[in-house]
């Protein structure tokens, strides 16, 4: 998910309020104004005396020539860099994105924000909105917060379904209602996960709960915002998780509750591109994976050669971060 910061220099209460209400991540304000922001709501500030220290945690650099590009690339290795271009050209940002991280592009409108977010199919890490047009601020925040990276989901073929004894399973209740074909990525391995479907479909046993994903056993990994993974047992109220639909579109959601209960469990294994995908789930009709057409498939109806959606990664992970090393999980 791209960061959206909003510039409110000189101090402008209307801009700060709009940034807060629209869901921006932070505001850049003059020194001495952080306390005024906190009176309006809980929001991160960027200033010489803010939550993120301007000149230390975050630096601003204008691109005027090739030397500035080299300077930004070096600075980005130790902190966030706000990049300003005098004529807002794409080429300098392309060069920077190819060799840097932690880049925040200053933009004036939604068109510039969209371009910055998509350059080289990766985009900058975020944008700093510099406009007094309150409608444009709302438009940019909505654009970048609702448009996230797309994941490549693949077809996995079920190879094994095995009933297990009782275990601790986790239900994730989010503050967002999910649609049919949407859920969360969960797996025994951080590099191979199933798309576990949300409880957004009718069934004869309980009322549908479109905000919920009955995710799996406590030890399982799930994908969260920022491309990281976490154990299901670590997820709690206020955390952000990644929602994924069957086309690979992603979005973030706030967790309202995480619920652990003892339930009969089952092991589901599948093969995808010669790699094993597995997950321990609750053994119940209401627990579902997702087929390649986006339809929910109850785990109790899975058979050998059934087809479901999975997500694979080549790298391993260490403390939830991708690492290029050989890791085998059984």
Image (cartoon, rainbow, N blue to C red):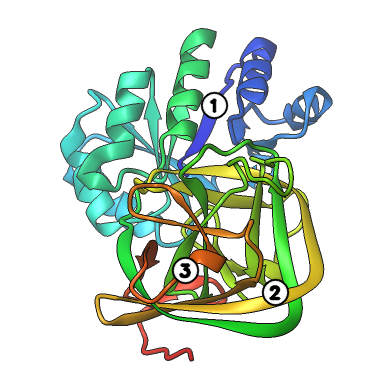
Residue 52 appears in which quarter of the rendering? top right
- In the displayed structure, 92 sits above or below 36; it is below
Instruction: Judge by depth and name the residue closer to the eye, 255 or 216.
Output: 216
Q: Tell me where residue 260 appears, x and y as whole percent.
A: 80, 66
Q: Residue, x 67% and y 21% (percent of image)?
A: 21
Q: Tell me where residue 111 appears, x and y as whole percent.
A: 30, 20
Tag 3 and tag 2, C-beta contact below 8 Å: no
Find the residue positioned furthest to the front. Answer: 204
Which element is circle 3 on? loop
Tag 2 and tag 1, C-beta contact below 8 Å: no
Q: Residue, x 75% and y 26% (percent of image)?
A: 37
Instruction: Judge by depth and name the residue closer to the eye, 179 or 222.
Output: 179
Residue labelled with disc 1: 6
Q: Tell me where residue 2 appears, x and y as whole percent.
A: 45, 41
Residue 178 appears in which quarter of the rendering? top right
Residue labelled with disc 3: 302
Q: Earlier in the sequence, mark 3 or mark 2?
A: 2
Residue labelled with disc 2: 218
Q: Residue, x 32% and y 75% (percent of image)?
A: 314
Relative to 109, 213 lies left or right = right
Relative to 305, 12 lies left or right = right
């Amino acid at each position: 998910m791209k960061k959206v910061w909003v510039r409110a220099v000189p101090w402008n209460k209307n801009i700060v309020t709009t940034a807060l209400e629209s869901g921006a991540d932070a505001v850049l304000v003059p020194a001495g104004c952080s306390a005024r922001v906190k009176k309006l709501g809980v929001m991160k500030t960027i200033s010489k005396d803010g939550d993120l220290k301007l000149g230390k945690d975050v630096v601003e650099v204008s691109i005027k020539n090739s030397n500035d590009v080299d300077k930004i690339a070096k600075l980005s290795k130790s902190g966030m860099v706000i990049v300003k271009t005098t004529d807002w050209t794409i080429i300098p940002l392309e060069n920077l994105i190819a060799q840097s991280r932690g880049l925040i592009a200053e933009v004036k409108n939604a068109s510039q924000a969209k371009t910055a977010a998509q350059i080289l199919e990766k985009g900058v890490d975020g944008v700093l909105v510099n406009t007094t047009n309150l409608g444009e601020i709302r438009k940019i925040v909505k654009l970048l917060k609702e448009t996230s990276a797309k994941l490549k989901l693949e077809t996995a073929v079920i190879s094994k379904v095995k009933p297990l004894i009782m275990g601790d399973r986790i239900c994730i209740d989010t503050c967002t209602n999910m649609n049919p074909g949407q859920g969360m990525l969960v797996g025994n391995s951080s590099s191979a996960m199933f798309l576990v479907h949300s409880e957004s479909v009718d069934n004869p046993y309980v009322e549908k709960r479109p905000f919920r994903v009955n995710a799996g056993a406590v030890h399982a990994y799930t994908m969260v915002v920022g491309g990281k993974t976490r154990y299901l047992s670590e997820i709690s109220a206020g955390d952000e998780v990644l929602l994924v639909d069957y086309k690979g579109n992603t979005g973030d959601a706030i967790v309202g509750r995480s619920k652990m209960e003892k339930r009969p469990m089952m092991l589901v294994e599948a093969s995808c591109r010669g790699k094993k995908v597995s997950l321990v789930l609750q053994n119940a009709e209401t627990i579902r994976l997702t087929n390649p057409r986006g339809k929910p498939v109850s785990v109790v109806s899975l058979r050998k050669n059934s087809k479901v959606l999975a997500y694979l990664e080549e790298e391993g992970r260490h403390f939830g971060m991708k690492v290029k090393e050989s890791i085998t999980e059984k």
